[in-house]
Image: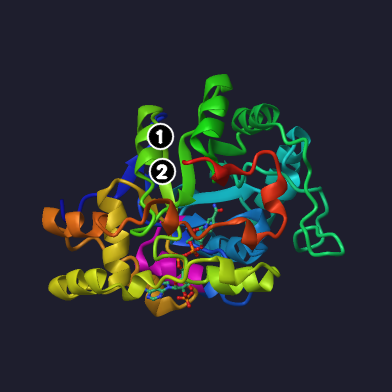
Amino acid sequence: MVGTLQHITFYNGQKMPIVGLGTWQAKVGEVGIAVDAALAAGYRHIDTAYSYRNEKEIGDTLKKWFDSGKLKREDVFIVTKLPLIGMRHSGVEKYLKKSLSNLQVDYVDLYLVHNPIGFQDVDDGGYPKDKDGQVLLDMTTDHISIWKGMEAQVDAGRARSIGLSNFNARQIKRVWQSARIKPTNLQVEMHAYFQQRELRAFCRALDITVCAWGPLGTPQIYSFVEKQGGDVSKLPRYDLLGDPVVKRIAQKHGKTTAQVLIRFLMQLEVAVIPKSSNPTRVEENFAVFDFELSPEDMEALEALDKGREGRLGSEHSQPGSGRHPEWPWFEPY
Ligand SMILES: NC(=O)c1ccc[n+]([C@@H]2O[C@H](COP(=O)([O-])OP(=O)(O)OC[C@H]3O[C@@H](n4cnc5c(N)ncnc54)[C@H](OP(=O)(O)O)[C@@H]3O)[C@@H](O)[C@H]2O)c1
């Protein structure tokens, strides 16, 4: 299996490179350097979102590569996401056009609905909040009408594929049943402490591929929650990159713990989008095609799963968001 596992394939035949560069919290002034390092290292998949506020610099870097002739547009799989402030039928085209303009491309390879909940459409550079720091929700979010807006983007050629992010199984099923163009991919939190076995099996049955956010255990989530005014003491404190089992397996293979955590998800046939703004770590995270975890290694890593206790994404990232009727994570999966 060494040297294989380059892509995961959607039901429509489209191939998504199995390792991509994550860019959440990759700052303007840094993200271009990270994307440059990633493309030089061989990454051909970049994950961003309108709400990361870094699409423009990613677009500038991609344009440089395309203009130089070193890469063609079709060589790079670009993913972006409908922001929570755009969660209504008319918001889909409005915000995808903004993303395309930022990214300086005519289409994205995959457009995801970022989250099942909706915020009021206030685009002031952050999330709209009331005077108590609670996010301003739009309680009328209608997934079916939003999905029709997503399908229209495929028809118009602005997105090759469409998918979902952070939806639970019930919400996915409802969209899937009503869809003319089915979702190709689900992007959700997934790592060795939160392996999402039921949700993976559920997606497999519907022929929806999975992409893991937070594959290294999303260590930057703690500073993010603090920045958003959330109660960070409510989150479990984990250090997945320092886990002794992961360390032991890494030592055995002469690899780093990050590389083992990425390879673990690849061998579960899940796409992985580790984020780094550091060019050396960007390279490190892509050097995962020259070794293979044994069945015993996989078993030991599978035993690290903490089930729902392993989840780090929570309403504390956006104080008040748990009041939305489509808040996804009160249900088992
Ligand atoms: N759909 C969603 O709602 C959603 C939510 C969260 C994330 N995402 C996507 O998924 C991507 C990955 O998730 P994530 O950013 O939360 O977490 P992650 O990839 O698990 O971890 C990123 C963190 O680990 C550090 N890191 C990266 N490589 C490392 C290495 N080799 N050794 C040690 N530390 C390393 C990074 O710091 P440095 O930058 O300093 O290297 C950063 O703090 C995001 O960037 C984003 O594209 C999507």
Question: Start and end of the magenta stretch?
Answer: 34-45
On the image, the x and y values in percent for residue 64 come to: 55, 65
Q: With 279 as the anchor, is 96 left or right in this view? A: right
Q: Residue at x 54, y 61 (%)?
A: 62
Amino acid type at circle 1 is: Cys
Figure quadrant of residue 260: bottom left
Colour approach in the figure: rainbow
- The residue depicted at 30 percent of the width and 72 percent of the height is 243
Could you say which quadrant of the image residue 43 lies in?
Answer: bottom left
Q: Secondary structure at mark 1?
A: helix
Q: Position of residue 271 (x, y in %)?
A: 37, 50
Q: Quick check: marks 1 and 2 in contact, CB under 8 Å?
A: yes
Residue 5 in view of the camera = yes
Q: Is mark 1 within 8 Å of ligand 1?
A: no
Magenta stretch mostly in which secondary structure?
A: helix
Q: CA distance from mark 1 to mark 2?
A: 7 Å
The residue carrying pointer 2 sits among few (fewer than 14), some (14 to 19) or many (20 or more) residues within 10 Å by Cα, namely many
Q: Earlier in the sequence, mark 1 or mark 2?
A: 1
The tag on residue 203 is: 1
Picture residue at 29% right of the left edge, 52% below the top: 266
Amino acid type at circle 2 is: Val
Q: How many marks?
A: 2
Question: Looking at the image, is 11 positioned above or below residue 68?
Answer: above
Q: Quadrant of residue 206?
A: top left
- Say if 87 sits above or below 315 in the image: above
Q: Position of residue 78 (x, y in %)?
A: 51, 51
Where is residue 188? Give x, y as percent.
48, 49
Magenta residue check for 52: no
Q: Is residue 278 left or right of residue 92?
A: left
Q: Secondary structure at mark 2?
A: strand
Who's the residue at 48% across and 47% down the image?
187
Query: Mark 2 — residue?
Result: 210
